[in-house]
Amino acid sequence: MQYIEKIQAHLAAEADYLLAFDKPAVSKTMLHLPGEAFIDQVYGSSDRTPQVLRSLGQLFGTGRLANTGYLSILPVDQGIEHSAGASFAPNPQYFDPENIVKLALEGNCNAVASTFGVLGAVSRKYAHKIPFLVKINHNELLTYPNRADQILYGTIREAWNMGAVAVGATIYFGSEESDRQIIEVAKAFEEAHSLGMATVLWCYLRNSAFKTGDKDYHLAADLTGQANHLGVTIKADIIKQKLPELNGGFKALNMGKSSYGKLDERMYTQLSSDHPIDLCRYQVLNCFAGRAGLINSGGASGQNDIQEAVKTAVINKRAGGTGLISGRKAFQKPMQEGVELLHAIQDVYLCKEVTIV
């Protein structure tokens, strides 16, 4: 069966809705789009050093999607972010860091993203076999009550010493601690670039006020888009963001006598629509019109993981995004099934019939 036939089967009733969509709010001609020459044409015009460009070349030049301009990354930092027991109970073999790296290798990923401890435990054996992306900060779930904060777990020099090609960090935009996190991560990214490593930013939102009624504006295109814009401002080379599911976060939070942020109605009428590809394209637009690659997260594991992952990949690719970073959907199942899921995601980016709209 050809790639497109498998993709259509996974999309089922949504196939036409997603694959035949041809009237985006923002033209692709406004964007810098993924491709074989993306590093030369886009990153190469920036102030990134030759060493950073080489590291980006390793990221984009590894695995099944090598030299396509797209990324398929396995992230497994959930042992801290979601607690090890809760994350690995479905598949206890992933308590062992080596199996995390093996899954990324078997899945033909561009890189494996994890903690200082996980990647440091096996760096001499694997750092030369697959690009390491070291996540430098994390939440922690033992403070009572739990709080939304990201704290540093090591140094940029540690990541460099273990042979990492890139470092990643999370900022909880909208949280009480976001100012400190922005300053910390900006400094860390400057040091990473000075040592020749690429930078990836998890641009997540955290604020209880973003949930109003039955709507969760943590997933709003306008709010996540602005988080992306802040992320590229502190010079993230690649932005990781959750796929948007709605819009109008700024409008919802400005109801009544409240004053929050700034908005222009054209954000919703001319720069986007309610179609998921348009919502995702608004995220790409905020990544300096695609000068920084947008990778969307795969989300939690559920009943229809392959179908949901393929759908996310189709939306990301057609919007002008750069790929997927999917963890729990892959490692919370037997390794061979995880490999199949990663390959199903990669099939979307290898499929010529799934085009940027």
Image (cartoon, rainbow, N blue to C red):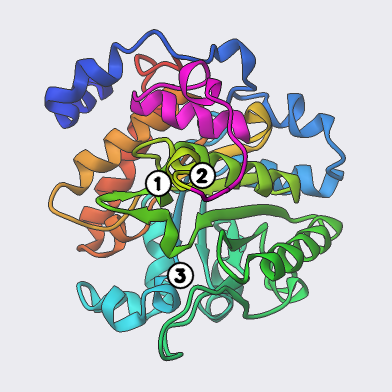
Indicate whether residue 279 is drawn in magenta: yes
Task: Look at mark 1 in the image and give the residue it sits on.
Answer: 219
Residue drawn at x 50%, y 41% as measured from the top left: 250
Q: CA distance from mark 2 to mark 1?
A: 7 Å
Q: Which residue is mark 2?
A: 224
Label 2: few (<14), some or many (≥20) within 10 Å?
Answer: many
Q: Quadrant of the N terminus?
A: top left
Going from N to C along the chain, the mark reached first, 3 or 1, is 3
Q: Would residue 209 appear left or right of 154 to someone viewing this image?
A: left
Location of residue 284 in the rendering, given as x and y in whole percent from the top left corner: 55, 31
- In magenta stretch: residue 26: no
| Marks 2 and 1, the one that precedes in the sequence | 1
Above or below — where is 335 with respect to 314? below
- Asked if 79 appears above or below 100 in the picture, the reply is below
* Separation of marks 3 and 2 at Cα, in angstroms: 21 Å
Name the spot of residue 120 as percent of width and height, x first. 58, 78
Q: Nearer the viewer, residue 296 or 8?
A: 296
- State which region is magenta: 257-286
Residue 69 seen in this snapshot: no
Q: Residue 186's x, y, as percent? A: 76, 60
Q: Taking 335 as reference, is 262 above or below it? A: above
Is mark 2 in CB contact (under 8 Å) with mark 1? Answer: yes
User: Which quadrant is home to the C terminus?
Assistant: top left
Under mark 3, the amino acid is Asp
Residue where numbered disc 3 is placed? 77
**Residue occupying image coordinates x 47% and y 38%:** 251
- Neighbours of disc 1 within 10 Å: few (<14), some (14-19), many (20+): many
Residue drawn at x 36%, y 18% is 354
> What residue is rendered at 35% in x and 81% in y?
84
